[in-house]
Image (cartoon, rainbow, N blue to C red):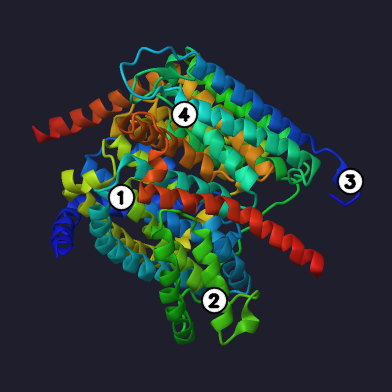
Amino acid sequence: MSHLSGRRVDRPAIVVGVVLLAAAAVVAYDANNIHAGFTYGISPSAVPFVIAAFLAVLGVGHFVAAFKEGLPTPDEADWGAVGLMSAGLFGLIASIAFGGGFILGSTILFALTARSFGRKALIVDVDIGFVLGLFIYILFNRLLGLGLPSGPIERGVLIGLDGVVGWISSLFGSSAR
Amino acid sequence: MDSLLALGSGFLVALEPINLLFAAIGVVLGTAVGVLPGIGPALTVALLLPVTFRLDPGGSIIMFAGIYYGGMYGGSTTAILLNTPGESASVVTALEGNKMARAGRGGPALATAAIGSFVAGTLATIGLAFLAPWLVRVAVNFGPWDYFALMVLAFVTVSATFGSSPLRGLTSLAFGLVLGVIGIDQLTGKARLTFGVPELLDGIEVTTLAVGLFAIGEAIYVVSRHLHAPEKPIPVKGSLWMTKEDWKRSWKPWLRGFGFGFPIGALPAGGAEIPTFLSYTTERRLSKHPEEFGKGAIEGVAGPEAANNASAAGTLVPLLTLGLPTSATAAILLAGFQQYGLQPGPLLFAQAPDVVWGLIASLFIANTMLIILNLPLIGIWVRLLAVPLPWLYAGILVFAAMGTIAANPSPVELIMLVIFGFIGFLMRRYDYPIAPAVVGLILGPMADNQLRRALQISLGDPMILLENPGSATLLAIAALALILPFVTKQLRKFKAEED
């Protein structure tokens, strides 16, 4: 920013200031609504009030800064790419929330993220995402014993996996006998 | 010599074959993840935390130590070869290290970073082993007011004193503090800021915040600027090994780096940037080849890297003895301890000495393991850097999602992760520091509890904080640390006007 435009109001700083004041109001409102019911000691709303005051001070600080140096001016952003990556993240959330499972979600996330970085080979990226999700799912479910969310794909995988494991162990079982 | 004895029994635990295996896996995983661009040690630990969930506490902490050191080492590799430091403490390493790599001396740069980290890390761990019991004896006498004052000091130094803007640092801290209030209050069982969402009753997970702010935020930030600033790793050409001349020029900076890093890291104030920066300027002043600085001087890599590692081990002193995290990495380590049901602090030394000393011993082992495994494997790690950016970040996002869902399989957790990701993106865009938010989240509720305990003892009189000499001194230092950046800013302004 040059010296001449330095007198202009910095909009991002104003926005942050407003958000901080709003947050201060919410924190104070919530603290005010904590009803007494504890038997002794200092109220659990004491510190939230202090934090609310702190937020308010910072909000005013941002207003002051908006009229002085403002926030650093960021580079031009590629909002299309940001949107594509966001779509991937929301795809993952949707897949987990509506029972699509982890593998479908990570496939969507991987493919759309790669595309947001300018890759055009969507089919290849879908395949990589699928294999990665499958690998992580089996690793977590079978080796670490942590259940990742399951959907139709996962159930199919587990049935298949149990089948293969059963088949292999039956091979070894029969040769041992 | 109680600590030697305790350390000895710690080594007996850590040297069990299965624990050695855990340490090795941790080091390899930590390096593999830490070497990826944009992933610093804090994020490495946060991402890999779920992997250690199902091990027994001893084994998981040992693996954890390996991940920690592996992540540190991986971060310096990225800084040197790709000029993308994953954390502010390796910014200085990138300065000379990347120039060396461009001049075809990437191998020696990586080697001096690794060996320097080993030397300084080992010395610092020895320092930790001797300093910790002494500090524990002091800390046992701390009252809640002292703890509260100590935490206020940490808040101020982490957010305001060392950053580029106190206003933005404090705002980041306030964000973390608000998140810390969310959930059931530990002392009274009252729900705060939950707005009736049951998933919020347990509070915000530190790992979710850290992974969201660091990993998702970084990915969105990079993709938003992708078209404008593409990055390419520098291939390592020529010999990987240091020459005799390199050794001669490296060993003193290593030791001096330790001298800067450990004491500053061990202060309950944090800031690994300061020792790395001090080390860099000192080496430039003392060097016989000052003309090489800015073009790839090996001292400029050896010193700061040693300082970085020594200060990282130094931050374990307040973390283990006081339960006080002073960096983002330490905050996540603390979250890790809590997940294993351990609360660092003076009591931990009394209640679970085998765990503490096992951890300290495994720091030695992880450090040694790191140098044994990583010097020969440098070639492999370098190849990891060549993963194309689209796949790299797509993979990072999948891993981030994996860690979050594995810890807490609910869509609400994922939504929070993504929201934190967007906030992290905006914070990067407008140059708000991230570490204060993470420290605020974990330290905020602790400070809240200590303050209320202090006030309960004084029957609500806040003067108790100023009547005790310990807390009064600490609060005075904190006030100074808060005012200092504003004063120096004014001074700099005057100077600039004079010039």
* Residue A136 vertical placement versus B140 (above, below): above
- Rounded to the nearest angstrom, the CA distance separating label 1 from label 4 is 26 Å
- x and y percentages locating residue B7 in the rendered image: 18, 60
Q: Disc 4 sits on a residue from what chain?
A: A
Same chain assignment for discs 1 and 2: yes
Frontmost residue, A16 versus B10: A16
Helix, strand or loop at mark 1: helix
Which numbered marker is on residue A47? 4
Residue under numbered circle 3: A5
Residue at x 66% of width, y 37% of height: B426
Residue at x 35% of width, y 52% of height: B318
The answer to whether residue B107 is visible is: no
Residue at x 24% of width, y 48% of height: B140
Disc nearer the start of the sequence (4/3): 3
Count of numbered badges drawn on the protein: 4
- x and y percentages locating residue A148 in the rendered image: 39, 25
Residue under numbered circle 1: B320
Q: Is A59 placed left or right of B471 in the picture?
A: right
Amino acid type of the residue tagged 4 in the rendering = Val
- Whether residues under marks 2 and 3 lie with C-beta atoms below 8 angstroms apart, the answer is no
Residue under numbered circle 2: B282
Q: Quadrant of residue B444?
A: top left
- x and y percentages locating residue B482 in the rendered image: 56, 50
Residue at x 80% of width, y 70% of height: B499
Amino acid type of the residue tagged 3 in the rendering = Ser
Helix, strand or loop at mark 3: helix
Helix, strand or loop at mark 4: helix
